[in-house]
Amino acid sequence: MKISRIIVLLALFLAASCATDLGGRIDQYANVPVPSPVTVTGVRPISGGAVIKVSIPDDPHLKGVVAVYERAGVEVNTKISRYVDSLFVEGYADTQEHTVNIYSFNVNEERSAAVPVKFTPLPPAIMTVKASIAESFGGVKVHIENNTSRSDLAICILKDDDLSDYGKKLSDMKWTEVTTLFTASEDIFLSRRGLEPKEAIFGLYLRDHWGNISDTLTSILTPIVESKLDTVKVNGKLHYVFKNANLGDDNCKSTNPGYYPVEALWDGSGLSSIPHFFVSEESGPSPTWLTIDLGNKARLSRITTLPRIGYVIYGGGAVRDYEFWGSLAPTGEAVPPTSDNPFGFDDSWFCLGKFTQAKPSGYLSNGLPGEITPEDSQVYNDGNDFELDPVQFPRCNDEVRYLRVVFFNTFSTFEYGHYTKNRQVQTGEVTPFGQPIID
C-alpha cells in the first residue's frame, strides 16, 4: 500500500511540474515560436480543385502545412508534413474562383500568418462525366463515359412506378431507391438486374466523394425479361433442352466421356467431382471449341462460367480466355479463315464476346497471374459473369440456336504457347442467360 501511494504522489507531482513549465497544458511544448510562412510556388487547377505547390522555409519550428478553405458552406482543411511540397485542395462542385489560406504550423499547432491563394477549379467529374441509362436484360444498364480524372463516383439509380409522374418536378415524384453502383473507371458499363419487366420511370444521378451530386437524368424504360436458358417453360412445365451439337467442325472432345462428359457443362450441379466437370483430350488442338445446341432460339444477354472448383487455381488446364459465338443454322463445315473469322467457322457464325477469367488483383504486365490473393481465389471459385456488350459486338443479342464455346487459352497455353504439349482443358459449367424464343 505504501509503495502504491508513493507512485501516485510522484505521478501527480510530475504532472503538476509539466503543467507549470508548459503554461498549464500538458499537451504542448514550452517556448516554441510560431513558424515562418511558406512560399507558394505554383497553382495547378484540377477537376473540382487545385494542386498548390509550396516551398518549405528552413525553420526548425515548422512541423507541417495546412490549407484552410470553405467547401459547401463548411470549413475544411488539408494538411501535409514539412517533407511534402504539394497540397491537394478538392471537392468543389463549381468553376467559380475560390480562396484558400495556407498556413505553416508548429508542434503546438500554432499557425503562421496566412498566405491567401486564389484559383478557379476545372469542372468537377459530376459536371463532365457523361452518364446514360438504358433498359437491359433483367434490369437496366448504365454507361459511364469521360471520367478522365478517374474520380470515385457513386451512380445512384431511382425508380417511380407511376408513369403519370413523368415530367413533374423531381421533388414531387415518388422515387424509390433501386441501387447505388460505384466506379472510378473512365469508361464502363454497369448493370442492375433482378428488376420486374414492367415499364417505369428511372432516375440516375452521380455523387462524388464529397457528397456533391449531378443533375438527375430521367427515362421511361422497360427491363427485358431474362431467364436462365438451360430449361424453358412450355405450357407451365420446365423442359431440359441443352445437348451436345457435336458438329463436324467441333474439335474439343472429352478425354473420357464417362468420367468427364461434355454434358457436365450444363448439368447445373456446380460440383467439382466426377462426372460434374469437363476435361478435354490432352492431345487436342489449341484454341479448341465445342457447340451447345440450346434446343430453342434465344437472344443471349450474358454467360456465366464455373471452373473445376478449387483445382489448380489460375493455372494448368483451367480456362483463362474465352470466346463465344452464335449461329441459327450452322453447316458444321470449316471454311478458309479470315481476319474476322480466324477459326474458319462457316458464315452463319458471329462473335458474341471475348472474355478473360476475372482476377481482382490483376494480371502481371506479361499476362501471367502472379500473386493470387484470397479475394482472387474467392472470385475464381465463384465463377465469371460475362455480360455481352453490343457496343463491342453489335450482333451479340441477335437470335441464336447454337452457342459455340471457344476455349481460346488455358493458363498453360497462355504461358507456354498454343503448341505446348499440355493443351488439355479442365472446366466446370457454361450457362447462358437471355430471352427464350419459343416458335
Image (cartoon, rainbow, N blue to C red):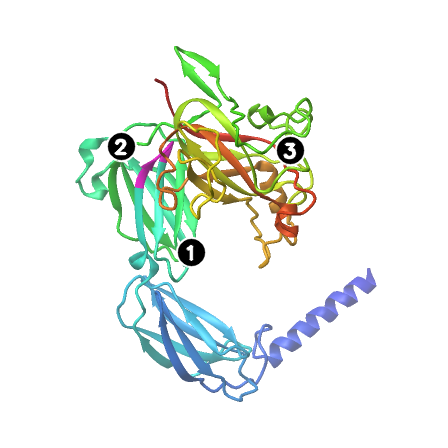
421 part of magenta stretch:
no
Whole-percent x and y of residue 368?
62, 53
- Report the residue at 32% width, 56% height from top: 129
Q: Is 109 rendered above or below residue 165?
A: below
Q: In front: 133, or 111?
A: 133
Quarter of the view holding residue 118: bottom left
Residue 137 colored magenta? Answer: yes
Picture quadrant of residue 348: top left
Image location of residue 24, percent across then percent down: 57, 76
Answer above or below: position of 238 versus 173.
above
Specify which label sits upstream in the sequence, 3 or 2. Answer: 2
Q: Which residue is mark 1?
A: 152
The range drawn in magenta is 134-139
Q: Secondary structure under badge 1?
A: loop
Q: Is residue 172 above or below residue 430?
A: below
Outermost residue on the right side: it is: 2
Mark 3 → mark 2, Cα distance in angstroms: 47 Å
What's the residue type where badge 1 is placed?
Asp
Q: Amino acid at mark 3?
A: Ser
Q: Amino acid at mark 2?
A: Ala
Residue behind mark 3: 280
Count of marks overlaid on the render? 3
Q: Is residue 269 visible?
A: no
- The one nearer the camera, 286 or 439, is 286
Q: Which label belongs to residue 200?
A: 2
Place of residue 69 in the rendered image (x, y in percent of width and height, measured from the top left): 37, 70
Image check: 406 left or right of 226? right
Residue occupying the point 82% across, 64% down: 3
Cβ–Cβ below 8 Å for labels 1 and 3?
Answer: no
Q: Secondary structure at mark 2?
A: strand
Residue at 74% across / 71% down in the picture?
Answer: 10
| Sequence-first disc among 1 and 3 | 1
